[in-house]
């Protein structure tokens, strides 16, 4: 019914509906963002991690912080799971959340801002003080019509904030975001100097980078950071969070203390089982993020040619981004020794058809197991039977609490919980 209504109602009418609903929410709750410093984080990857890390930094600096991400909601010391299957809540819920943050004495609110949320004007009537661009790669292309329109949607967040912009200078799309006016611009980078159309006023660079088996190490202005996070991509996420802190006059030493206390991010390169083999759960659901996850595992955790990587994957979101399915199969074939394709969030699409489209991009041996629990069980059994050091990586859902299937039905789910349950059944 919802999709039918969308088809018969003109897009311009729907846009006005979303806009007016955003205005209504702001009026109803008294424009709460005016009594907070609001930070918006957008991009294709890393948004949730940046929200979590920035929240830790501001809390370490002595502030009360509220935050919204695809992982959780948090208001000061109260937190609860984001079980909406929606990263950025609807307009009324979002304004109500900000009002509750004000009522609980929060000085800051950090919001993960999505392109879908921007299309539906969920960012409207929120006074953003800081906006952050993490990176950009193809996603939701069918929804937006083209990559350029997807980028334009992200850019609208920077149009509504003229105070502080924080930008990933190493992303090839950064010049597009640099063109928007702001009182102050911060950039972050791990690469050598590049030429920009109009450079930021302050650049935070990571130097002396080391990727270790238990984390990442880097220096910013001679302050050494030792993070309990895996992957070079998490250096970018940490730098974005550091820039947020610095934009609010938080010292590098405070940023260091906060980030080094972080033991990991739920469902993001999360090691669920350590021994006798490693099992990792990650949210990666785009070709670029999948590639980076596999590279991180092979570079940081697998340091011998006798080691084996077993991959369990699907393709996020039935009915959308079909272009990426064979590409993800191709990436898995390049990095994984054994591949198990399984169900993820098919919605109303035939899940086996999705699996077949991923398989079209692979070459060599793979298994197709529709039942995701059975696929995870199979991966653990293969790891147990292996005579080599083995790592199992399960991607696509991370810490998501639901699996979305036909008819709008949501099945309670958590890859991490399923891994632990099936691991206990093995005779080790």
Image (tube, rainbow, N blue to C red):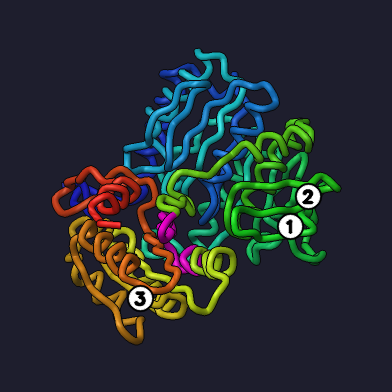
The residue identified by callout 3 is 338
Q: Depth-wise, is mark 1 or mark 3 nearer the camera? A: 3
> What residue is disc 1 on?
189
Residue drawn at (25%, 57%) of the image: 427
Label 1 SS = strand
Q: 292 above or below 413?
A: below
Measure the C-alpha gap from mark 2 to mark 3. 40 Å
Query: Left or right: 32 with respect to 272?
Result: right
Badge nearest the viewer, 2 or 3: 3
Disc 2 element:
strand
| Dot placed on the residue nearer the N-terminal end, 2 or 3 | 2
| Quadrant housing the C terminus | bottom left
Compare residues 409 and 296 and report the one nearer the observer.
296
Check if mark 2's residue and mark 3's residue have beta carbons within 8 Å. Answer: no
User: Residue 195's x, y, as percent?
Assistant: 80, 66
User: Does 125 sit left or right of 226 as displayed?
Assistant: left
- Label 3 Cα neighbours within 10 Å, binned few <14 / some 14-19 / many ≥20: some
Q: Position of residue 380 (x, y in %)?
A: 30, 62
- Packing grade of label 2 (10 A; few <14, some 14-19, many >=20) is some
Q: Are marks 1 and 2 in contact (CB under 8 Å)?
A: yes
N-term mark: 1 or 2: 1
Q: Position of residue 413 (x, y in %)?
A: 26, 46
Residue corresponding to mark 2: 204
The residue tagged with tag 3: helix, strand or loop? strand
Q: Which residues are magenta?
A: 275-292
* Earlier sequence position, callout 1 versus callout 3: 1
Q: Is residue 277 within the magenta segment?
A: yes
């Amino acid at each position: 019914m919802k999709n039918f209504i969308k088809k018969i109602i003109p897009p311009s009418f729907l846009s006005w509906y979303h806009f007016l609903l955003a205005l209504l929410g702001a009026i109803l709750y008294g424009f709460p963002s005016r009594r907070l410093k609001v930070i918006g984080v957008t991009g294709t990857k890393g948004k949730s991690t940046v929200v979590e890390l920035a929240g830790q930094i501001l809390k370490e600096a002595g502030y009360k912080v509220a935050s919204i991400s695809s992982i959780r909601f948090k208001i000061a010391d109260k937190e609860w799971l984001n079980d909406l299957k929606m990263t950025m809540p609807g307009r009324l819920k979002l304004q109500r959340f900000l009002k509750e943050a004000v009522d609980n004495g929060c000085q800051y609110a950090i919001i993960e801002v999505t392109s879908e949320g921007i299309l539906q004007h969920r960012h409207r009537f929120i006074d953003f003080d800081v906006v952050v661009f993490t990176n950009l790669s193809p996603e939701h292309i069918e929804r937006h019509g083209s990559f350029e329109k997807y980028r334009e949607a992200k850019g609208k967040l920077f149009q509504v904030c003229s105070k502080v912009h924080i930008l990933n200078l190493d992303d090839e799309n950064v010049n597009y975001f640099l063109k928007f006016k702001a009182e102050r611009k911060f950039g972050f980078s791990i690469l050598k100097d590049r030429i920009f159309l109009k450079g930021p006023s302050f650049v935070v660079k990571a130097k002396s980078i080391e990727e270790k088996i238990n984390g990442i190490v880097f220096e910013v202005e001679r302050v050494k950071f030792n993070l309990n996070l895996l992957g070079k991509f998490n250096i970018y996420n940490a730098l974005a969070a550091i820039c947020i802190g610095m934009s609010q006059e938080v010292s590098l030493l405070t940023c260091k203390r906060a980030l080094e206390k972080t033991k990991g991010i739920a469902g993001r390169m999360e090691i669920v089982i350590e021994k006798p083999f490693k099992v990792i759960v990650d949210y990666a659901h785009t070709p670029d993020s999948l590639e980076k996850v596999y590279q991180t595992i092979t570079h940081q955790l697998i340091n011998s040619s006798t080691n084996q990587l077993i991959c369990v994957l699907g393709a996020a979101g039935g009915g959308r981004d079909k272009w990426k399915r064979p590409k993800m199969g191709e990436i898995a074939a390049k990095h994984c020794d054994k591949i198990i394709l399984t169900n993820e969030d098919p919605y109303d699409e035939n899940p086996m058809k999705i699996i077949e489209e991923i398989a079209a991009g692979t070459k060599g041996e793979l298994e197709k197991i529709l039942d995701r629990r059975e696929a995870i069980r199979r991966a653990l059994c293969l790891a147990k039977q292996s005579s080599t050091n083995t790592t199992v990586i399960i991607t696509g859902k991370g810490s998501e609490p639901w699996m979305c299937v036909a008819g709008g039905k949501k099945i309670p789910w958590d890859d991490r919980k399923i891994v632990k349950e099936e691991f206990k059944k093995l005779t080790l």
